[in-house]
Amino acid sequence: MPRLDIRKRNREMPYLDGKDRPNTRDVYCYAESSDGVRWTKPEYLSYSANVDPGRREGKAGDVKDPVGEKYPFGRVSELYTNQIAPYYRAPHLLLGFPTRYIDRGWTESVKSLPRYEYRQARAKDSRREGTAVTDGMFMTSRDRQQFSVWPESFLRPGLRTRDSWFYGDMYQNWGLVETKSAIGDAPPELSLYATERTMQETGGVLRRCSLRIDGFVSLHAPLVGGELITRPLTFTGNQLTLNASTSAAGSVRVEIQDADGQPLPGFALAGCQEVYGDDLDRTVIWAGSPDLGALAGKPVRLRFEVKDADLYSFQFQAGSQ
């Protein structure tokens, strides 16, 4: 398979085409190779900010980081690294975990960050060693060129008093590891690793962070409820399964519609059994049956009704009847 090589640009690296663009840390292009020696011509990536349409107005390009700068290609901050790889449960989907760089200078809040005196000492040779901070971000792509990047942090430095909130912390590792949960009756989880104590005299370390499988982002709604209708899609299989977590009072229901948005007989919202609980792979049932075999290969839309719940993913599968 071709290898994906998405490269970082910083203030010392010129753009390949020599065009005048803002100097900024940037995950900016990719190239492919089948042998690691011969590479295709690098191609520029493009970005769009994944702004929550239900809570924020304005165009994605209007999103700024706290420094007040706007960045090229729809990005929302300066980015180090990329950590992009196909997701092992859905290889057509690329997941990236870049590192965000923010430097507000010597503000009052810097005095409350861990080890202020040591921070001042680090800043003697380079101010940003004392004032800049980094955290973990998240972005995705289906075509290797257009990336959707979330403006909000994926991995915060956290409630720490010594080992974090320094420039160079929260660099996430490449790749995800499926690991056994520390809770005996819980399913496996995903682990990733991030840096701490970067360039401190005690030496850097990696901290393991964990989350539920598919738990990167979710469709969430309060108890009063919310809905989402997908674009037309086709599927194979005969069952729909959900990775979802609800409260005791919450639920998820699904309606299957035709391509024009009309409920299909037997699969209307009213006939869907409420899904509640916390599962990675719950089968959706309509009027006593989950069988969707007659709809396979036909364009359909899915209408999700969510109440005090998080829907992380859905999947069509071949199940026994």
Image (cartoon, rainbow, N blue to C red):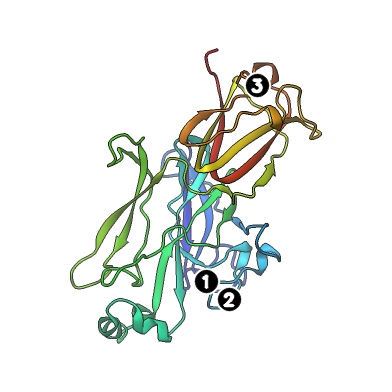
Q: Position of residue 177 (x, y in %)?
A: 34, 42
Pointer 3 local density, CA inside 10 Å: few below 14, some 14–19, many at least 20: few
Pointer 1 local density, CA inside 10 Å: few below 14, some 14–19, many at least 20: some
Residue 276 lies left or right of residue 253; in this view the side is left
- Between disc 2 and disc 3, whose residue precedes? 2
Secondary structure at numbered mark 1: loop
Type of amino acid under label 3: Ala
Mark identifier at residue 287: 3
| Furthest residue in direction front, as rendered | 249
* For the residues bearing labels 2 and 3, Cβ distance under 8 angstroms: no
Q: Residue at x 60, y 24 (%)?
A: 285
Q: Is residue 16 above or below residue 239?
A: below
* For the residues bearing labels 1 and 2, Cβ distance under 8 angstroms: yes
Closer-to-camera residue (235/35) = 235
Secondary structure at numbered mark 2: loop
Residue 268 lies left or right of residue 241; in this view the side is right
Which quarter of the picture shows residue 120?
A: bottom left
Between the C-alphas of marks 1 and 3, the distance is 56 Å
Residue 106 appears in the figure: no
Residue placed under numbered mark 1 in the picture: 24
Secondary structure at numbered mark 3: loop
Q: Residue at x 56, y 31 (%)?
A: 315
- Between disc 1 and disc 3, whose residue precedes? 1
Type of amino acid under label 1: Thr
Between the C-alphas of marks 1 and 2, the distance is 10 Å
Q: Position of residue 281 (x, y in %)?
A: 48, 30
Closer-to-camera residue (129/24) = 129
Residue placed under numbered mark 2 in the picture: 69
